[in-house]
Image (cartoon, helix red, strand yellow):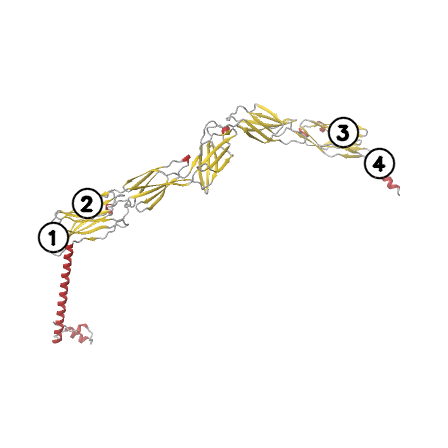
Amino acid sequence: MLLNPILLLLLQYIQSFDCANIIVQPVSINTTLNSTVVFCCEAVADIVTFRINNQSAIDETVIANGFTISTFNNGGTRRAELQAIAYDHNNNTNISCAATTFTPVVVQHSDTVLLMIQGPLDDVSNLNYTIINGSSVLLTWTAPYTLDNVPITGYYIVVNELESSTTNNTNITLSTSDVNPCVFNNASVSPMNDVGIGSPNSISFYYERVPFSNFAISVTPVVERQLVLLYITIDVSTICEGEYPNNIAATIMTTNNTIISSTSISTIQVNDDMMITGIVTIPNNLSTFMVNVSLSNSGGEFLPTPPFVFGVVGPVTNVTSSIDCTSITITWKAPTVDNGISIEYYNLSIYDDVIDQLLMSVPVYNTSYQFVDNNLFIYRYAYVITGVNVLGEGISTRATFSYQRVPRSANETTVSVELEFAQELIIKFSIHLLGMLMCTGEAPNSATVAVQCNGSGSIYSNSYMLKYTNQPSNITGLALVPLNQQCNFSVVFSNNAGSSKPFVIPLDTFHPYPTNDITTTTQLLSPTTQLLSPTSTPASTSLNAIAIITPAVLGAIIIILLLIILILVCIVISYKKKENRSVSFQQQAPVVTSYNEAYQFNTLMINNNNNPAYEEIKLT
């Protein structure tokens, strides 16, 4: 029983020694297109062969695809070599070898390996350029993908389809001695391997230089919410693209050249209007500042430009005013605007300069303004004009104009005069103020009323100081006029500009006035409908009527009053005495009555002692 296990182990050892054993495995090969490669496989076996995509290497189709197998025997070790041509259709071919023994029949397979074929290389990626100076350009790129152990042998560079060069690096510097900023240069880069030149990648650029000619630069501040933005605009329509600036530096300074902030703009884009625009944010608490703009490209620094000065709007000048009755026009000259910052509008404040009262404030979008004076009593106006730009209000200008002119004369529609006789001849006059106001500035400060006679001279003269209120009223008064003289009533209006022509009314004092106490009134001139300017607003002066009485008239009135009082006292005393005598007589004599029919009738009808018809009739 012990012999059987020993024999079994010996038999297994002998069998393992005679079985196929692969001692050299084939390995994967990466190669270039159309190249020839050899796969090897060694084994201790009776037969060693290859299989291609699970087909025998001696199949006609395999042989037709470019595969050829060769075998060699070296003292019991067999070696098989598979020669493969790297045709395009053989890419990613699976290859394995098999070792076979006949006694016993054992087949051992190797690992499966790949034949991978690298064709022409794809184009390089991330191709870019950097202008080193005006005449040199650095090209850089990233190598394309290639199979392991299939190297990129170099790069082929062509410039403007004329110049070519090669390099083993992923960058190259291109230079020229004739810089033309108006010529668009084209450079292509192609990778190379053993297959040949791969796909190209191209890039275009301009050689850069500083422009020789000037071009327009503008700086415009714009307020957006709480930010103040500077829009820097460059007109590049007159220069070549190789002369465009690729960097804009804006330095904000105070007027004494103290730097507040500095900003650089390197992202440059040209719009359809051939403009380059950059935006810079500045502090919003600046009232006056300077902006220094400097430009550059790879060719160097551009010529310096004068600084742009910004600030509040300066004062307007040459303020003038004209008037056409009630229409007032104000004009002025705009202040000088630095570097194109525009005045958005003007704040115009209008004051009554006499009492320094603000009447209205309006925005004006040009350099003139017209308004209608609705208050004809205001004759002096003050105008405060302030320019406004994006930075706020500027410096104000105050101008004062007086439109006062000589008042119009009174006329029949504004003056009425009455003559009354009551012991003496009295003149009553009434002067309507608003009736003579037509235009601004004609309002009087005072009115002088006078009565002159050829025999007595000036018998009455009085000046009324006029105060303007919102309600119309009259100047009224009284004066004694002598009879039978040639007398004139006159009115003169005055203000600071002068006096009106006297308005004169002749008085008829030769009338046969009655001598009794009945008052006779003669209407010389009656006021008619008030004539007002259609643009005027009613405003007037309220004056109390003033009765002017001479001392003689006052004494006569006092005497008359005393006589009236004395007569009344006498009448009262006489009446009292008469009443007392009547009462005494009634007490001494009986009352005589007469027959009353009403009494008889009512006595028959009712018995009522309270009937009023019953009372006795007293005889005197």
Marks 4,2: beta carbons within 8 A: no
Left or right: 592 in relation to 533: left
Amino acid carrying label 1: it is Tyr
SS category of the residue bearing label 3: strand
Amino acid carrying label 3: it is Ala
> If you read the primary sequence from the N terminus, does the residue marked by circle 3 or circle 2 appear first?
3
- From what the image shows, is residue 476 above or below residue 599? above
Residue designated by label 4: 14
Question: What is the quadrant of the C terminus in the image?
Answer: bottom left
| Coordinates of residue 141 in the picture (x, y in percent) | 59, 31
User: Can residue 594 be seen in the rendering of this structure?
Assistant: no
* CA distance for labels 4 and 3: 26 Å
Q: Which mark is residue 593?
A: none
Residue designated by label 3: 80
Residue designated by label 1: 513
Query: Can you name the residue that lies furthest to the top here?
Result: 162
> If you read the primary sequence from the N terminus, does the residue marked by circle 4 or circle 3 appear first?
4
SS category of the residue bearing label 4: helix
Question: What is the quadrant of the N terminus in the image?
Answer: top right
